Amino acid sequence: MGQTCQRRMSPEIKLYLLAENRLLRDTLTRLLRKRSEILVVGVNRITTTSKEEIASAHCDVLLTDCFDSTTHSAFLSDVLREKPETKLVLFGMNDDPATFLRAAFLGTCGYMLKDASVAEMVAAVLAAVRDEATCPPNLCLSLIQYLQRRGAASPDLANEQASDKKALTPRQLQLIQLVANGLTNKEIASNLNLSEFTVKNHIRRVMRRVDAGTRYAAVDVVRAAGHLPLR
């Protein structure tokens, strides 16, 4: 009885599955729906209406294999621009550094190869909502080497990135304002039309960014920086 209650109370990750192949969509949907921590809020291929459907689903994670064309990349870029809090996890990808770098520049949190199992996909989804990236080690090295080359070509790049470390996104500032107003995670989720799980992760991300130990300490830091009105 206790285990059942705990399972029902555990936070669900809202996941939208976007895949071109119908058989693959149906198979993955069936397997993902067996996971108690994942709530599949939408399944589709790229159509003229799928962008609006993804936005209205308010998903935490977009899981897709649609990344093999410029059109697909532009589609995903638009989705992330409209919903920057959405985590993008790619699967069925090639072991190709150039493709991986393009995905990294887009903002993907997970890059799974063609031989990835469903369990590995789920692990990448769970990692994404914890603000952790998943990618093959050799491709991760290619990203490090690329940044190393860029750093060597532009010595001021590291200093510019360090000075921007504590900058918050508009969504994070909106959320921390609601924290400052005394709202609970549940109230913030309702106000912003997000899941409580997403709100909790946003707050943790802000706390890490401003080096604060609690949500209220984060409010004080952001207020001291002049991004929130004084009491």
Image (cartoon, helix red, strand yellow):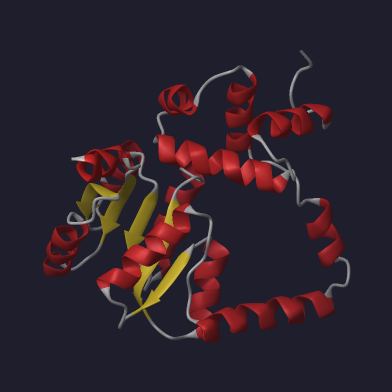
Q: Residue furthest top?
A: 231
Task: Residue 147: name its quadrant.
Answer: bottom right
Residue 111 visible at all: yes
Q: Position of residue 62 (x, y in %)?
A: 36, 54
Q: Pick the residue in front: 31 or 58.
A: 31
Picture layout, residue 192 above or below residue 117: above
Picture layout, residue 90 above or below residue 175: below
Q: Position of residue 206 (x, y in %)?
A: 64, 42
Q: What residue appears at the point 47 percent right and 85 percent down from the top-left corner?
A: 96
Picture layout, residue 41 above or below residue 146: above
Q: Position of residue 61 (x, y in %)?
A: 38, 52
Q: Pick the residue in front: 88 or 39.
A: 39
Q: What residue appears at the point 72 percent right and 40 percent down from the top-left corner?
A: 212
Picture layout, residue 181 above or below residue 45: above
Q: What residue appears at the point 32 percent right and 44 percent down from the top-left corner?
A: 12
In the image, 181: left or right of 54?
A: right
In the image, 140: left or right of 28?
A: right
Quadrant that contains the N terminus:
top left
Q: What residue appears at the point 84 percent right and 52 percent down from the top-left corner?
A: 163
Q: Position of residue 94 (x, y in %)?
A: 39, 83
Task: Residue 127: name its quadrant.
Answer: bottom left
